[in-house]
Amino acid sequence: MAAPDLPPRPGNPLLPWRARLLAGAVSTLHAASLRSDGTVNRFLLSLFDRAVPPTTAPVDGVVSSDHAVSDHLRVRLFAPKRDEDDYGKVIPVVVYFHGGGFVFHSAATSQYDALCRRLASAVPAFVASVDYRLAPEHRFPAPYDDGEAALRWVLAGAGGALPSAPAAVFVAGDSAGGNVAHHVAARLPDDVAGLVAVQPLFGGEAATASELRLRDAPFGAPERLAWLWRAFLPPGATRDHEAANVPAAIRRDAGAGRWLAFPPAMVCVGGWDAHQDRQRAYADALRAAGAEEVRVAEYPDAIHAFYMFNELADSKRLLGDVAEFVNQRTQHLKKLAASHAHH
């Protein structure tokens, strides 16, 4: 799991034609919906960002339901089908934050609905996918506030939607959702069993080598990234703001000891992702600041958002790696609780 020293890579990522086509189409749609005045054409997005309803009958062995956490915040809860002998087992809960540059998508977006369903089945876990508010209509810190509220709702039993009080609650997310998951875990570190950051989106004023090298890779265009950060960060803030340049913020705070209590983290990095240097820098900064456990899972052939394409071998490997991390951590916490009960 150690980070290789990657040389500049020739050519293009090897993608099946369907994945290549879809990545290109999503990228084009995103670009077309961002207006130069800093607003988003939500109507254009709604034509292509297909939303699906929750399913009361199992689909791929998972049922789902929508819940209101507050007047503006909803969570879609995915529950894996359980056999009779599973009912005594502790099933973890994963609070999930979708990607989309803080601007796009929702918990009901068909690709995210399918991803959360696969995750719920693979672990198996309850997955609470958070419909946090989006920029530019709702800037920093709205997604972090919504994420914290959703996590507290799950910790309190999810309004009775969980069969029992959750024994282990994880936070996870991809891209901008990985950024949100980090900030939510940092707010409530003692309540989080672990963090899964899948290609988390971080930023900074000085471009990294991978951002320069992979500027033409899917979801790597510098102008688009600059637009998204401007839409999300406080007006006038630079990308070195603590919400974006998380590795630098961790290094600044390292002496204060606040990261010693940060939950075990798994950081998933793709070899064709423009953001990979910042993701490894994030893992390094956490380790240097004394965080309990930091795993880096490398997917050398993966583009940004590769997990959206279920047919890719790396997507299946990612689910297996996340399931292993969540289950190992859940078992560890179960053992700790049992030993405390004996003393």
Image: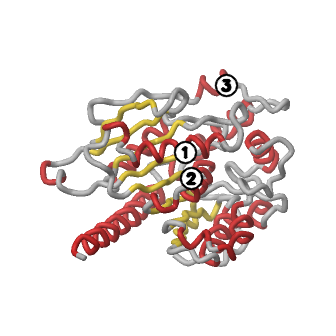
For mark 2, what is the residue? 184
Q: Secondary structure at mark 1?
A: helix
Tell me if residue 303 can be seen.
Answer: no
Mark 3: amino acid: Arg
Are the residues flagged by discs 2 and 3 in contact, CB closer than 8 Å?
no
Residue placed furthest toward the front: 343
Q: Nearer the viewer, residue 154 or 41?
A: 154
Tell me if residue 17 can be seen.
Answer: yes
The residue drawn where x is 26% and y is 47% is 164
The residue drawn where x is 61% and y is 56% is 200
Q: Residue 337 at what x, y percent from top left?
A: 29, 68
Mark 1: amino acid: Gly
Which sits earlier in the primary sequence, circle 1 or circle 3? 3
Tell me, for residue 232, which label it has, or none.
Answer: none
For mark 1, what is the residue? 147
The reply, left or right, for residue 151 in relation to residue 337 is right
Are the residues flagged by discs 2 and 1 in contact, CB closer than 8 Å?
yes
